[in-house]
């Protein structure tokens, strides 16, 4: 618990919720994938770094963010690094969303009371976490952030021992940040 949170509690006020920050341990979980398999964080981390992308299909900022996550997945995942979507919607709606946005990275379902979203302290979507193989969170961010996406791409490139390629094309007008 942060110093700010402890002080507010002492005064009888509740601090606003915030997601887990970099440097903390990632809570383990096991969720069902779109193909009906149980997938745990430990299974994923055994292969290398993992980027978790929590989203809701009705969220406009999530819709803006996921194509860039797909770019990262196409360039860097496999052989260790992986991007995993965690949907806060049902399987059918999530499958339709993934098809519409061309998402091919694995997606897990956190739809029954959002146990994993709650364990990670989510207050909004999209929220991204980059988790090192030892389970330590290296990056934690909410909303769309060019810097966060570039950091994930760079980390994945390093894990594959390759130079990172530019994530954003020069002809794209992309904001630095969009709140979720």
Image (cartoon, rainbow, N blue to C red):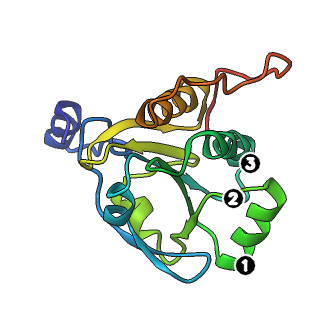
- The answer for how far apart the CA atoms under marks 2 and 3 are is 15 Å
Name the N-terminal-most of marks 2 and 3.
Answer: 3
State the SS at label 2. loop
In the rendered structure, find residue 92 and report the number of the disc placed on it.
1
Count of numbered marks: 3
Q: CA distance from mark 3 to mark 1?
A: 17 Å
Mark 2–mark 1 distance (CA, rounded to whole Å) = 15 Å
Residue at 29%, 46% in the rendered image: 14
Contact flag, marks 2 and 3 (Cβ < 8 Å): no
Quarter of the image for the N terminus: give it. top left
Image quarter in which the C terminus is found:
top right
Please say whether residue 52 is visible from this viewpoint: no
Image height of 102 relative to 74, above or below: below
Lower sequence index among marks 2 and 1 = 1
Foreground residue, 75 or 12? 75
Q: According to the image, label 2 marks what residue?
A: 104
Label 3: state its secondary structure: helix
In the image, which disc is placed on residue 129?
none
Quick one: label 3 or label 1, which is nearer the N terminus? 3
Q: Is residue 46 left or right of 178 when viewed as pictured?
A: left
* Mark whose residue sits in front, 2 or 3: 2
**Which label is found at residue 63?**
3
Q: Quadrant of residue 58?
A: bottom right
Contact? badges 2 and 1 (CB < 8 Å) = no
């Amino acid at each position: 618990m942060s110093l700010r949170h402890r002080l507010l509690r002492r005064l009888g006020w509740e601090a606003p919720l915030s997601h887990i920050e970099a440097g903390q341990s990632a809570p383990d979980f096991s969720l069902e994938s779109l193909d009906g398999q149980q997938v745990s964080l430990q299974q994923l981390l055994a292969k290398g770094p993992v980027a978790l992308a929590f989203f809701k299909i009705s969220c406009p900022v999530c819709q803006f963010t996921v194509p860039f996550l797909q770019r990262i997945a196409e360039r860097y995942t496999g052989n260790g690094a992986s991007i995993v979507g965690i949907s806060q919607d049902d399987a059918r709606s999530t499958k339709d969303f993934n098809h519409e946005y061309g998402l091919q990275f694995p997606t897990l379902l956190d739809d029954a009371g959002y146990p994993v979203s709650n364990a990670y302290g989510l207050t909004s979507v999209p929220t991204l976490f980059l988790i090192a193989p030892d389970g330590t969170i290296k990056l934690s961010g909410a909303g769309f952030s060019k810097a966060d996406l570039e950091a994930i791409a760079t980390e994945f490139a390093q894990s594959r021992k390759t130079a990172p390629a530019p994530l954003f094309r020069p002809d794209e007008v992309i904001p630095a940040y969009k709140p979720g």
